[in-house]
Structures are given as C-alpha cells and as structure tokens.
Image (cartoon, rainbow, N blue to C red):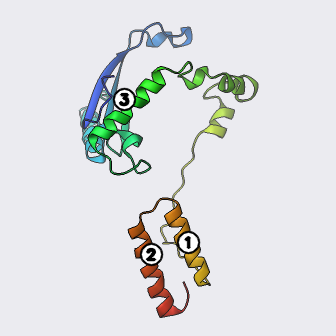
Amino acid sequence: QPVRGMDGVKVASVPLRDVLPEWGFLEGVDVKVAVAHGLTNARKLCDEIQLAKEKNEPPPYHFVEVMCCPGGCLGGGGQPKPTSTEIKMKRASLIYAEDHGLPLRKSHENASVRRLYDEFLVQPLAHHSHELLHTHYKAKDTEPRTFAFSHNDQVQDVLHLLVQNGYPRDTRALLTNMFSDIVDKYGYV
C-alpha cells in the first residue's frame, strides 16, 4: 500500500521473509521499490539513479515502475472521459477491493499456468520459456507510412472504423476534411 496512489513518486521498502529455500540468500533483504506517475517524475527517478551510479554507489532502488498516465492504466487513454483524480481514486479502490475478494490472486498459482510450465515450459526463465514468452524489440522504420485508397468508399470505411473504435467526432471531421482536400487536389487518396 505504500506505493499506491497517484502522487508523483512513491517509494517503499519491502522486507523479504520466509522465502523459498532456493531463494534463501534473499532472506531478510529489504527490497527498495519506487513508482513514478508521469514521465516528469520518471525523469526524477532516472536522475537519482544516475547520480548514485556517478558516485559509485549502489542504485537506490531494486525495482522501478513507471506509469505514463497518472494513476496508471486506470487513468489512461482507454478509460471513459472525462477523468478526474477523484474518479481515478474511486476506480482504484474498486479494483483493489475486487482483487482482494478473488480466490486466486497470483498468476504463478493459477492451475493452468502451473500445468503449462509442468508439461511444456519446464520452469520460469528456462531457455524454452524465455524464447516463447519474452518480448524482442527491433527498431521501427523512420519513414512515414503512406496509405493509398483508390475509391471514396474506402475513405468512408476508414472514417467509419475510426469513429466506431472510439476516436472523437472532431477527429472524424478533421480526417474528413483532410481526405476531401486530398481527393480534390489529386483525385484519390
């Protein structure tokens, strides 16, 4: 709970107790965590970590979580608008209450996940599970993409999909005007 909320940066220390035998070397360690809400606050954490590195000191945190949207995803772009801090806090309290009442709250205790590892993936972080489950990043093209529509019907289909998928009506008007200007000038999009 010390890192819950929407304040800029929240920090906590979590003592590890009664660890599994294979993790015995971590018994008694205080894990230092930080949560940053917004990229400005993430920058502050990065600066703090960099300063420790420059002083040849250990990093101030073992784990850092950065949420671009204040409040995390419950305050992000996929949520109903308008969103105030009060609404975000209410959503968070409801999510925590719902989670607290669930009989299964940890993915590694899920019977389906355990079976998947037992029968196929072997163990977490094994080579096979790493190859299948970890994300691999690659550089994106720097060239802007262009779209070629040969008929006005295709433009209308694109506009319909944008509105249907939650883009605001003013976006539709902007795109309609843009497509109309292109069609008027070039005869196609």
Numbered disc total: 3
> On the image, numbered disc 2 is attached to which residue?
175
Amino acid at pointer 3: Ser
Closest to the observer, 185 or 86: 86
Q: Secondary structure at mark 3?
A: helix
Q: Secondary structure at mark 2?
A: helix
Report whether 93 appears left or right of 138.
Answer: left
Q: Earlier in the sequence, mark 3 or mark 1?
A: 3
> On the image, numbered disc 1 is attached to which residue?
158
Amino acid at pointer 1: Val
Closest to the observer, 97 or 38: 97
Question: Measured from the top left, where is residue 110 in percent x and y?
Answer: 62, 23
Q: Which quarter of the rendering shows the C terminus?
A: bottom right
What is the spatial separation of the Cα atoms under label 3 and label 1, in whole angstroms? 38 Å
Where is 109 relative to 17, above or below? below
Location of residue 58 by image quarter = top left
Amino acid at pointer 2: Leu
> On the image, numbered disc 3 is attached to which residue?
93
Location of residue 118 by image quarter = top right
Circle 1 Cα neighbour tier, 10 Å, few/some/many (<14 / 14–19 / ≥20): some
Closest to the observer, 89 or 46: 89
Report whether 58 appears left or right of 102.
Answer: left
Question: Measured from the top left, where is residue 34 in percent x and y?
Answer: 32, 30
Where is 177 relative to 13, above or below? below
Q: Secondary structure at mark 1?
A: helix
Closest to the observer, 3 or 27: 3
Question: Measured from the top left, where is residue 18 in percent x and y?
Answer: 47, 6
Q: Earlier in the sequence, mark 2 or mark 1?
A: 1
Disc 3, disc 2: CB below 8 Å? no
What is the spatial separation of the Cα atoms under label 2 and label 1, in whole angstroms? 10 Å
What is the spatial separation of the Cα atoms under label 3 and label 2, in whole angstroms? 38 Å
Residue drawn at x 53%, y 10% as measured from the top left: 20
